[in-house]
Amino acid sequence: MSHVRFSDTVAEAGVSFFFKQWGEFSYGTRVGKRSAGSMLDGREHKEFPNG
């Protein structure tokens, strides 16, 4: 079974994808929400649907 990225799946389907944040943890260590950030697969996903 191969690894499938959710962000790739929604991009292929032409669906907007907004990833808000990871929460308070980064790699198992509590760092706070701001420090944990909102990067996913090396970039921020901040897309909204048109309409």
Image: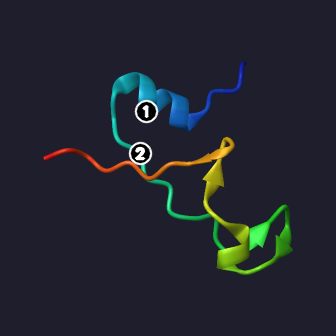
Note whether residue 24 is visible: no
Q: Which residue is mark 1?
A: 10
- Which mark sits nearer the N-terminus, 1 or 2? 1
Circles 1 and 2: CB atoms closer than 8 Å:
yes
Label 1 is placed on what type of residue?
Answer: Val
In the image, taking residue 45 as reference, residue 1 lies left or right, namely: right
Q: Tell me the distance, in whole angstroms, between the alpha carbons under discs 1 and 2.
A: 7 Å
Residue 26 picture location, percent across and down: 79, 65
In the image, taking residue 13 as reference, residue 24 lies left or right, namely: right
Q: Residue furthest top?
A: 1
Residue 18 picture location, percent across and down: 43, 52
Is 13 or 38 nearer to us in this picture?
38
In the image, taking residue 21 as reference, residue 31 lies left or right, namely: right
For the point 73% across and 74% down, the residue is 35
Q: Which residue is mark 2?
A: 17
Element on which disc 1 rests: helix
